[in-house]
Amino acid sequence: ISDKDTKNSLQQVGKKIILKTVTSNLIKLSARESACIKLLSQGKTMKEIALDLELSSRTVESYIENIKNKTGYHYKSELINEYWRNKI
């Protein structure tokens, strides 16, 4: 892996998004987590995401918390920024 590959990046693999952190740790998101972060990045609220994905708001919140735990980010705004910065 070159230094260029160690930059933050997002790769879409099927319906899953793989986040690559600055430290080159690959973080695999489930299809639902990927869908949640995509919709969140489009400006949708948790309630709107829940309606779109036919889930409860609490389930969506859990997916977002899982993503934050996997990535080490603490705020939704950080996830959104990372998504748009590295979007393919």
Image (spheres, grey):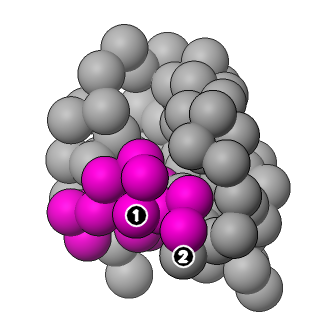
Residue 4: give x, y in percent of width and height.
38, 55
Up/down of 72 relative to 15, above or below: above
Location of residue 11 (image quadrant): bottom right
> In the structure shown, which secondary structural element does the residue marked by tag 2 occupy?
helix
Visible residue check, residue 27: no
Residue occupying image coordinates x 73% and y 80%: 15
Report the predominant secondary structure element of the magenta stretch.
helix
Up/down of 73 relative to 56, above or below: above
Visible residue check, residue 79: yes
Q: Which mark is residue 5?
A: none
Q: Amino acid at mark 2?
A: Asp
Q: Residues under labels 2 and 1: Cα distance?
A: 6 Å
Residue occupying image coordinates x 21% and y 35%: 77
Q: Quadrant of the C terminus?
A: bottom left
> In the structure shown, which secondary structural element does the residue marked by tag 1 occupy?
helix
Q: Amino acid at mark 1?
A: Glu
Residue holding disc 1: 48
Q: Are marks 2 and 1 in contact (CB under 8 Å)?
A: yes
Residue holding disc 2: 52
Which residue range is magenta in the image?
37-51
Residue 18: give x, y in percent of width and height.
64, 57
Q: Is residue 55 left or right of residue 77?
A: right
Residue occupying image coordinates x 60% and y 18%: 69
Residue occupying image coordinates x 54% and y 76%: 52
